[in-house]
Image (cartoon, helix red, strand yellow):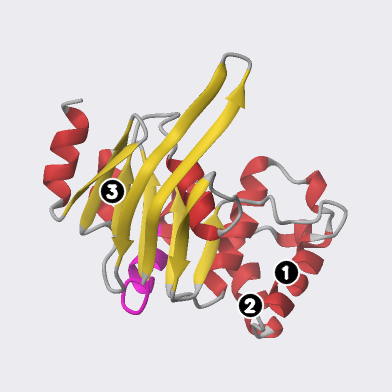
Amino acid sequence: MIEVRNLCKKYRTTRGVRTVLDDINIVFPRGRNVGILGRNGAGKSTLLRMISGAELPSSGQVIRNASVSWQIGFSGGFHGSLTGRENLRFICRIYAADIPKVTAFVDEFSGLGDYMEMPVNTYSTGMKAKLAFGLSMAIDFDYYLIDEVTAVGDASFKKKSKEEFDRRKDHSSLLVVSHSSSTIRSHCDAAAVLDKGRLTFFDDVEEAIQHYENQ
């Protein structure tokens, strides 16, 4: 289970303090795939980063009683001067993952080929996302945090990504943030709408989508 309690996030700007997330409370139970819908700039990715532990809240807390992936598509944890394969081995050691097994999966899934032997700072944004995505899928987590930024690559890669998500649903939970109703409809069985810093949860995906599209 992941529980978010009284979560707030504020940023100082030249125009004063901006509240991005305002007293968010939600529980993400095991066995449910939950989407978070919101317009661009609503704070969806900020919320996902705090759930992953990559960013701290201004107040409140995130309680994780399960293993949680990093934000899929987020490549900020890579060391730019190391190769893709060196980064892979480093991450495997952190998560006590089987290096040969993870390597075989990422090589096949990402399609990066010889770029795996090149420094990550030579990668395009899409290539970094493919590496991060492949690594996330190669390691077993109870929850996978999925950002819409993972919609990278050609039609073949996107098809592989969707098929892998569908396989993960058998034993893991997905937490998906997106501004796209079709993405949430495709992957989730419950959803919440993030608007003006507040989060409204719906047991029914279609109710959430209707609320979101009527804003």
Q: CA distance from mark 1 to mark 2?
A: 8 Å
Q: Residues within 10 Å of mark 3 (few under 14, many from 20)?
A: many
Report, in whole angstroms, how far the alpha carbon at label 2 lies from the one at label 3: 28 Å
Q: Which residue is mark 1?
A: 88
Report which residue position mark 3 lands on.
184
In front of the other: 158 or 199: 199
- The amino acid pointed to by label 2 is Val
Residue at (84, 56) in percent of width and height: 118
**Label annotation for residue 102:** 2
Q: Main secondary structure of the magenta part?
A: helix
Depth order, front residue of 37/53 = 53
Q: Residue at x 50, y 47 (%)?
A: 59
Dot 2 or dot 3, earlier in sequence: 2
* Identity, as a three-letter code, of the amino acid under mark 1: Leu
Mark 3 vs mark 1, CA separation in Å: 29 Å
Residue 141 image position (x, y, % from top left): 48, 75
Residue 32 image-quadrant placement: bottom left
Residue, far top:
15
| Contact flag, marks 1 and 2 (Cβ < 8 Å) | yes
Q: Which residues are magenta?
A: 162-172
Residue 103, placed above or below residue 113: below
Q: Indicate the position of residue 147 as horizontal and vertical percent values.
A: 46, 48
Q: Quadrant of the N terminus?
A: bottom left
